[in-house]
RNA sequence: GCCGCCUUAGCUCAGUUGGUUAGAGCGCUAGAAUGUGGAUCUAGAGGUCCCCUGUUCGAUUCAGGGAGGCGGUACCA
């Protein structure tokens, strides 16, 4: 049989991804774009490690003596649990609390990095993915929240997505107020109601109504138990959700103010939204960029006030052409309680997170990622093994001149293979020096890009060879200037 | 977790109403062409037909179970 079962099958764990040169270039470009916006807003970078003590992340299960399933965890030497961070906010709270004395307040920072969630992956959902966050810690006012929303919008614009997203804004206090008025008191029921509201754009009014009441059966036949509200309660919630869509944010807010069910807590939230809407208006952010939307919930329980979310306004399909449910590509809100887990002082904070990986996936799937093809190096071919010192010298000259260059390192001394290699690397040019050139003090430079163009018409291989499209000869001393000139001409 | 669909060569997929040597395109390797990429032609390598159990003279094909993938749904701190 001769079957070798000892060989390991190379396979990626589900929900994780390898990234090649083009992907990395695209991601770096996105990161740089986002970074420049955050810098311009006056935020400074900070970096925290991938691991934190689980208790610092707040993800210890109260009943059992181990961390939440959703986080990747392991035990340190002293048996204390450590976890891979699942977002960049909890680690920031820890960092701020730990360095409280030295940090300026408000503390305005950004940071970017991979976070990890041990969950079932889906379209645009990975178990390792990149986020790019900005936070203002120690600023209580709605102007700090409004700034976050405007920065989110500016970031999306900078990423070339003008008019193709919307930042939706709501306030948890409004939600809480409505629920209180409706007499929804148990925490569990509250959560279920919030989740139901969150599904509005997914399932529509009917779906939400079912989820608020008995429950809903989805297309795959699965049944989701509802919140079990009475008809009267459902009406209150729906009335609040389905205020008429109007032209401006302040009009939108007025619609809710008109509802008699709004209690003191709800009105507090409304006032904050009014303040934010006024700032959006005066700064020229229209409803098509930032919209007050009472359907925004956000899952995280630590949000205490304004919450916001970036949504793409174009449909996304996967590689198979199937329409795909694509979540938000960024979000955030005010989390006034997070730092107080570590410190006695009340520390208000607000921030948001850009889902870099998810956004990149959406852009790639919709063909909006832009051209990030990576240009290869100039390759110096090895014609004579004895001359590699000479070839290496040429490479060094090119590198010293700032040109990306390498000597062919493969096994094959076959000329054609070396050219095929350069072609596959997307090299701009190769340098050819055999005995003929050496004796005459010359080098052959082959412009692979021009050559490809010139060769398009050539069908016959003999002609193709003798024609040597894109190839020319210069004195050895002219190597670097000739290559430079060629590269300049190519861009 | 629950529901649906899927799994055959590196990739995309045919096919076998249960039968002996399981195919194509692309890709890969080599040659035509030993100093010239592409196109062309020729040849070659590459398979546990996802795994296990059962039914059967015989299973890649049928049945049951499992795993993995895709999608939905739940959860998502």
Image: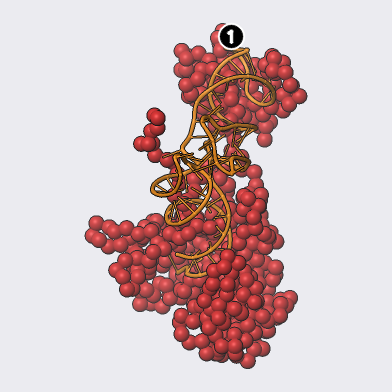
Chain colours: A red, B orange
Chain letter behind tag 1: A
Q: Residue at x 50, y 20 (%)?
A: A412
- State the count of labels: 1
Residue A341 at x, y percent in the picture: 37, 74
Residue A114 at x, y percent in the picture: 46, 55
Foreground residue among A440 and A315: A315
Tell me if residue B61 comes above or below residue A235 in the rendering. Answer: above
Foreground residue among A103 and A274: A274
Residue at the spot of label 1: A436
Q: Is residue A410 visible?
A: yes
Tell me if residue A32 comes above or below residue A385 in the rendering. Answer: below
Residue A124 figure quarter: bottom right
Residue at the right extreme of this rendering? A457
Q: Residue at x 74, y 21 (%)?
A: A458
Horizontal side, residue A86 vs residue A213: left or right = left
Foreground residue among A345 and A241: A241
Q: Is residue A98 visible?
A: no
Residue A403 figure quarter: top right
Q: Circle 1 sits in a helix, a strand or a loop, which is it?
A: helix
Q: Residue at x 61, y 17 (%)?
A: A444
Tell me if residue A74 comes above or below residue A331 in the rendering. Answer: above
Residue B76 at x, y percent in the picture: 47, 68
């Amino acid at each position: 049989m001769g079957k070798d079962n000892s060989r390991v099958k190379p396979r990626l764990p589900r929900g994780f991804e390898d990234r090649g040169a083009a992907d990395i270039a695209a991601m770096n470009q996105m990161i740089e774009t986002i970074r420049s916006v955050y810098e311009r807003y006056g935020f400074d970078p900070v970096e925290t490690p991938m691991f934190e003590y689980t208790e610092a992340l707040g993800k210890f299960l109260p009943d059992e003596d181990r961390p939440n399933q959703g986080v990747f965890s392991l035990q340190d030497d002293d048996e204390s649990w450590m976890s891979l961070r699942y977002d960049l906010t909890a680690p920031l709270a820890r960092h701020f609390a730990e360095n409280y004395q030295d940090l300026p307040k408000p503390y305005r920072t950004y940071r970017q990095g991979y976070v990890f969630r041990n969950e079932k992956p889906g379209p645009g959902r990975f178990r390792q993915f990149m986020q790019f966050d900005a936070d203002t810690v120690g600023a209580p006012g709605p102007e700090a929240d409004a700034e976050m929303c405007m920065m989110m919008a500016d970031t999306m614009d900078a990423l070339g997505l003008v008019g193709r997203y919307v930042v939706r804004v709501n306030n948890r206090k409004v939600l809480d107020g409505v629920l209180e008025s409706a007499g929804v008191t148990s925490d569990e029921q509250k959560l279920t109601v919030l989740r139901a509201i969150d599904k509005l754009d997914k399932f529509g009014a009917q779906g939400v109504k079912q989820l608020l009441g008995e429950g809903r059966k989805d297309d795959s036949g699965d049944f989701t138990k509802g919140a079990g509200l009475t008809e009267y309660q459902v009406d209150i919630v729906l009335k609040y959700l389905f205020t008429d869509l109007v032209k401006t944010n302040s009009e939108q807010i007025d619609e809710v103010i008109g509802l008699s069910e709004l209690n003191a807590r709800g009105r507090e939230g409304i006032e904050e939204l009014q303040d934010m809407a006024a700032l959006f208006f005066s700064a020229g952010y229209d409803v098509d960029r930032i919209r007050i939307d009472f359907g925004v919930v956000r899952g995280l329980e630590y949000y205490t006030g304004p919450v916001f979310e970036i949504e793409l306004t174009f449909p996304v399909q996967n590689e198979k052409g199937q329409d795909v449910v694509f979540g938000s590509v960024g979000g955030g809100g005010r989390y006034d309680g997070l730092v107080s887990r570590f410190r006695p002082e009340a520390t208000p904070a607000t921030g948001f997170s850009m889902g870099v990986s998810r956004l990149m996936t959406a852009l790639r799937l919709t063909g909006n990622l832009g051209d990030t093809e990576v240009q290869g190096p100039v390759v110096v071919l090895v014609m004579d093994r004895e001359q590699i010192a000479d070839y290496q010298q040429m490479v060094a000259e090119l590198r010293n001149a700032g040109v990306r260059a390498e000597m062919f390192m493969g096994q094959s001394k076959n000329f054609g293979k070396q050219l095929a290699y350069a072609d596959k690397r997307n090299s701009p040019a190769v340098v050819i020096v055999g005995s003929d050139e050496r004796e005459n003090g010359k080098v052959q430079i082959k412009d692979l890009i021009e050559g490809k163009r010139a060769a398009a018409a050539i069908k016959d291989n003999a002609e193709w060879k003798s024609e040597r499209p894109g190839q020319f000869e210069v004195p050895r001393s002219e190597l670097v200037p000739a290559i430079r000139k060629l590269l300049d001409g190519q861009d």
